[in-house]
Image (spheres, coloured by chain):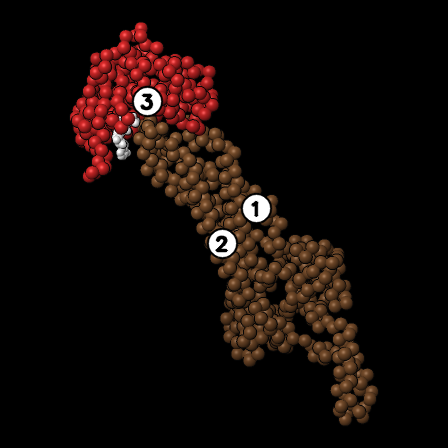
Chain colours: A red, B brown
Amino acid sequence: MEDAVRAVDLSKTYGTGPAAVKALDHVTLTIARGTVAALLGPSGSGKSTLIKALGFVSPADTGEVFFGGRLVVKDGVPLADLAALRRRHLGFVFQKANLTSFLTARENVEIACEFGGKSDGRKRARELLAYLDVAGRERSYPEMLSGGEQQRVAIARALANEPSLILADEPTAALDSVRSRSVMELFRKVAHDRGAAVLVVTHDHRALEVFDVLYEMEDGRIRPHQQERPAPAAAP
Amino acid sequence: MNLALRDVRRHLARFVGTAAGLGLLLSVVVAMQGIYAGMVDDATILTRAMHADLWLVQRDTRGPFAEGSRLDPSVEARAAAVPGVRTARPYTYQLIQREHRGAVMRIALVGLGWPDDPGRSLPLVRGRRLQQPHGEMIVDASLGLGIGESLALAGEQYRVVGLTKNALTSGGESVAFVSVADAELIAFDQPAEAAVLERQRVVARLRRTDLGRGQPALEDLATDSRWRAPALASPPVAAVLVQADPHRIAEVREVMRSWGDVSVYSQDEEEALLLGGVVQRARMQIGLFTVILTLTAAVIIMMVMYNLTLEKTHDLAVLKLMGAPRTRLLGLILQQAWLLGALGYAVAFAMGELVFPMFPRRVLITETISLVAPVATMGIVTLASILGLTHVMRIDPSTALEG
Ligand SMILES: Nc1ncnc2c1ncn2[C@@H]1O[C@H](COP(=O)(O)OP(=O)(O)OP(=O)(O)O)[C@@H](O)[C@H]1O
Ligand SMILES: [Mg+2]
């Protein structure tokens, strides 16, 4: 299947001298559309740094990032309008839901549609909220929603523009195991139904069978996950 | 979707509260400027309402407002005889303080040259001009007297026949207009006790002279109340106001300048003396205060706007991460600033309409103020949002990922 994003030889160092931290160390990675990939690894291994580089938020120092086959960032220099790229083709889901506090659930999704240039934002927002099973809460402000509901609204927002790449950084950290599993399954559904590439940073090893690919990071280096995948029936 | 309005809707009470506070601040600034304008306008009404081309006052004085001026009454006739002069009329000015119905009244008493000037040029809002040389007065409405009411001055009743508006001195005293003759009566009014004492003094002095000792009948004559000292010669006036043919003013002025006992000022010069001498300090004071207040307001507004932006930092970072166009985020801040400015101005305007008329000093909202105030308000809130705007530009979208 078509590649959504391809990173070639990304390196990034925070700080200088003895205090320097090599957060990315020659990372090369491809995520195809229609796949859900998990990114595992201990704290401080560079997972968030990679997400930021792939999401065109803070570029790596060296290396190249291709998006939909086009070279977009080379050695930290943007070759396209990154904000425009983000609003049209990317969806983000964070650890905390990070909804816009002064917009209702529906408006949070609607504004993303608007940024992406969709004209029927309101209708689409309703559909997405229904798809994620939170249609009943569309007039609620984020602070009135439960953590799980917030996270589902955030996913609806990430889906607003039919993104080719969804990046999620520990999206289930604030959720209990039942809810976190249902969120992971949602990502799978989105990838398979809508043909998006999904990269999820997670510490949660209980739901790994949901993913098509597993990566592991350590000290800024990436490699395929070594552990055996648990049999689906054995999962809690 | 308008983000600015959504945010306001979410925090409506706080936003309205901020706007109200801003409005009160603005209304104080406007009041200050209005008081300043009122002060200047009040001060010049005394000179302007007289419609004189030239003011003759005591030589080398800056009278009659900035300092006392005593002019021999003969100047009036002399001035009238100068070729090119249309009218010359006497003018007196003095401050008196009287109690009326238990309240203290400070009055600036202006004597008008009867019969040439019965108050023809005064801006009357009700009633009429003086119609007889004695016992009538025109007062400023700020004294609180109505038409037909009487005021006891120097043992006589003066009936109010006309009312002016905003005829106040720079000190805030209401101006009252009577004929020059009445003004002099009031000025040289003597309590009975003082008259008795003066009479005794005259008698004692007479008795020390040979003439007094030889002619005792002189005593009666000397102490007759009609012979009171000021009545012996006509009392001095404060100024003589001259109207001349428009094209001969300079010529008339040249003639009068050569007289040894007068100084000549044009209407503008007299006004400048009044403003420069009497009003200057108060004006500086209020002017400086207005400047400081305006700056304070600007700084406060700037901090308020900055805080409103700071509070939204996280929301803005999330929107940035989602790829929100920069103009949308800057627009959010600017639109809120303008909304705040507009609401604040509305509050200030309402305050002005309701409260300013109750101020003891006149708050004059000149055309300039009413034009400049809204423009300046919008300018200030726009400038004040600069801090917030730079903050928006600096927000790093990756902070949104950190949760
Ligand atoms: N802004 C920064 N400045 C300096 N060092 C940073 C910065 N961000 C991350 N680092 C360092 O880079 C390394 C990788 O950080 P990163 O946030 O990518 O780790 P992570 O795998 O996401 O960890 P966690 O699981 O705790 O979220 C860490 O050692 C971290 O201390
Ligand atoms: Mg992280």
Q: SS class of the residue under badge 3?
A: loop
Question: In what quadrant of the picture does the C terminus of chain B appear?
Answer: top left
Instruction: Name the residue nearer the viewer: B95 or A91.
Output: A91
Q: Residues within 10 Å of mark 3 (few under 14, many from 20)?
A: many
Location of residue A99 with respect to B347 vertically, above or below: above
Q: Is residue A236 visible?
A: yes
Q: Residue at x 38, y 32 (%)?
A: B314
Which image quarter: residue A159?
top left
Q: SS class of the residue under badge 2?
A: helix
Discs 1, 3: same chain: no
Discs 3, 2: same chain: no
Mark seen at residue B290 = 2
Please, which residue is most extreme toward the top here?
A: A233
Question: Residue B98 location, x and y as percent?
Answer: 71, 63
Location of residue A156 with respect to B284 vertically, above or below: above
Discs 2/1, front: 2
Mark seen at residue B352 = 1
